[in-house]
Amino acid sequence: GRVKTIDPRKFTKIDEYFTDYEPDYDYQRRVQQATPQVPSETVQKPKYGEQQGHRKLITRPGLAAYCLAQAGYRCEANISHTTFTSKASGNNYVEAHHLIPLKYQPKFEFALDNQSNIIALCPNCHRLLHHAMTNEKRNYIRKLFSKFSNKRRSTLKNLGRETTLKYVLEYYS
């Protein structure tokens, strides 16, 4: 049989699916194993390191673990969502999600890996934000944004770029 050429746009989507998953899996594992660390009150500049010859944004699993604890190990999209007890933390298993995805860090003056940008989600809601149709993602973001405190909104605003609901929705297209 003849080998069929894959449309480059489809290949990019397939590649994004798999390359997005592996780093997130490793990140979630590190968060589950981390000791919660209270964040600094000041918004920080992003930090970079080297990994396999590439510049890589440094994330803080202890900060994400703190955010999960602050959320009471409940899904911030729907607190009635329960999963299972994590053997690493002994709490209801939830995952850390950066509301403004880290791949957009170059557009921001301050670190996206901060308390106001990390939300606790059950695995199902987390996968929805990564893999659902655009309209479903955007509806979920609207729902999440409506639950945010004024403090969280004001801290998001201090990241060095507009972070209103309108602009956050653009990251989920």
Image: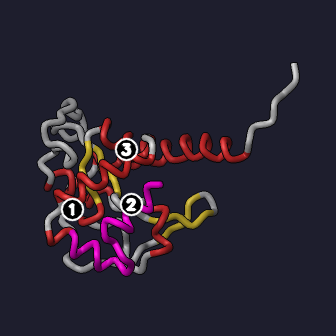
Disc 1/disc 3 C-alpha distance (Å): 33 Å
Instruction: Give the quadrant of residue 43.
Output: bottom left
**Residue drawn at 48 percent across, 74 percent down:** 107
What residue sits right under mark 1 in the picture? 37
Few, some or many C-alpha atoms within 10 Å of disc 2 (few <14, some 14-19, many ≥20)?
many
Amino acid on which disc 1 is placed? Gln
**CB-based contact (under 8 Å), mark 1 and mark 2:** no
Residue closest to the eye, 10 or 53 = 10
Whether 13 is among the magenta residues is no
Amino acid on which disc 2 is placed? Leu
Whether 171 is among the magenta residues is yes
Residue closest to the eye, 106 or 64 = 106
**Residue drawn at 30 percent across, 48 percent down:** 140
Instruction: Decide if residue 138 is in sight here.
Output: yes
What residue sits right under mark 2 in the picture? 169
Element marked by disc 1: loop
Disc 2/disc 3 C-alpha distance (Å): 11 Å
Few, some or many C-alpha atoms within 10 Å of disc 1 (few <14, some 14-19, many ≥20)?
some
What residue sits right under mark 3 in the picture? 136
Few, some or many C-alpha atoms within 10 Å of disc 3 (few <14, some 14-19, many ≥20)?
few
Element marked by disc 2: helix
Say which mark, if any, is on residue 160: none
Q: Position of residue 97 (x, y in %)?
A: 33, 52
Region rendered in magenta: 153-173
Amino acid on which disc 3 is placed? Glu
Looking at the image, which residue sits at the far right? Answer: 2
Residue closest to the eye, 62 or 70 = 70
Q: For this view, does 97 lie left or right of residue 47?
A: left
In the rendered structure, which disc, 1 or 2, sits on the residue that comes first in sequence? 1
In the rendered structure, which disc, 2 or 3, sits on the residue that comes first in sequence? 3
